[in-house]
Amino acid sequence: MYFKQILDERCGCASYLVAARKSHEAAIVDPSLDTAQYDALLRERDFRLRYVIDTHVHADHVSGARELRTKHAAELCLHESARVAYRFRPLKDGEELALGQLRLRVVHTPGHRPELISILIVNPPRSPEPSMVLTGDSLLVGDVGRPDFGGGDAAVQYESLTRLLRLPDWVAVFPGHFEGPCGKGMCGRPSTTIGFERLYNPLARLDRGAFVSTLTDGVPARPLNMTAIEATNRGLADMPWAMLTATPAVREIDVNALETRPPDAVVLDVREPEEYAHGHVPGVINLPQADLASRLDEVPRDRPVLTLCERGIRSLRAAQFLIQMGIEQVASVKGGTAAWRAASKAVAVGDTSVEKPRVSESEWAHAGAVSYRI
Ligand SMILES: [Fe+2]
């Protein structure tokens, strides 16, 4: 067999090319939008792409699956419960995809997302047992995929983790992420084994109650531009530009400069509405980072824009995205609302922001799917 893990440093995602050397049939799992890299690999090895599989509908990056299907006349596969507006081969738990002498066995492991699947790789000429599992965002290295945004369920995630950890010790685990917002405490390694995770994954040692409360503790910060990215991956919008692909330098200001900002400056608090309602800098507008791309028309281009979050991390990435979109007068507030509070400055409470649809009606209409809501 041939196996290659492809790491995308920009979004912390891992994708996979699996192929049978004799038959030259290949499968790609969780491809990024940069599909040229897979084209080159397939060409170099003279592989024919038979399946392209998304382990789930991604919320943090735009999938290249449909583009690969079109280019290579491959079958696009998702779990049968996936809610997307395009055709796909629906996979069932326990189903096997033949790839030359290899078998890709589907294991439904919901929790992070209802439709999430893991894929066991079996090479019968070598062993009847699986040697590897691609876990998507179910089991991560030292962590599990977050169930607290986008239709996940922590109790269901517990069942999926328990099921995966019943695999033999030697099974090598290759996750969908090594960094990024889909986990809370990933180790950073790009792979592990079932045996190691059973012993040393801190979540694997918790009982169901402790597992659920650990994973649902606090307000979930949805990923940057999640609304636009998820709608794009469901086939309901066409906004691949919503991915942050550049890392421009961002000017940072401190909370004193925030307090004495020019009167025409607009301050965007990119935290979740619940965090904003709990306490915010007076006079700032709540525009959660998840909705930034889908509400971009609300961001002025002719006035200074300051981004603000809890500690200055989300606001920095939000500022980078605004710069990527050609908005020039942008700065991020260093230390965020926590630094503002620590400086004993006045804090306002309550939700004063106007409720907005997460994807505008015109975008739904453009996607031809106005009646389909996520
Ligand atoms: Fe995910």
Image (cartoon, rainbow, N blue to C red):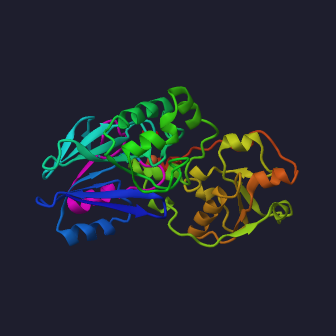
Looking at the rendering, in which quadrant would you find the N terminus? Answer: bottom left
**Residue 84 location (% of width, % of height):** 36, 43
The residue nearer to you, when weighing 362 against 73, is 73
**Residue 86 location (% of width, % of height):** 31, 47
Residue 102, magenta (yes or no): no
Give the residue drawn at x 45%, y 49%. 141
Residue 79, magenta (yes or no): yes
The reply, left or right, for residue 68 in relation to residue 226 is left
The residue nearer to you, when weighing 159 against 358, is 159
**Which quadrant of the structure image shows residue 63?**
bottom left
The residue nearer to you, when weighing 60 against 71, is 60
Give the residue drawn at x 34%, y 35%. 81
In the displayed orientation, state which residue is furthest to the top: 209
**Which quadrant of the structure image shows residue 276?**
top right
Q: Is residue 260 above or below residue 357?
A: below
The reply, left or right, for residue 102 in relation to residue 30 is left
Q: Is residue 233 above or below residue 46?
A: above
Residues rendered magenta in the picture: 58-86
**Residue 93 location (% of width, % of height):** 27, 34
Q: Is residue 334 above or below residue 357?
A: below
Give the residue drawn at x 36%, y 37%. 164
The reply, left or right, for residue 21 in relation to residue 130 is left
Q: How many marks?
A: 0
Give the residue drawn at x 44%, y 60%. 240
**Residue 31 location (% of width, % of height):** 35, 57
| Residue 151 seen in the figure | no
The reply, left or right, for residue 103 in relation to residue 68 is left
| Residue 332 seen in the figure | yes
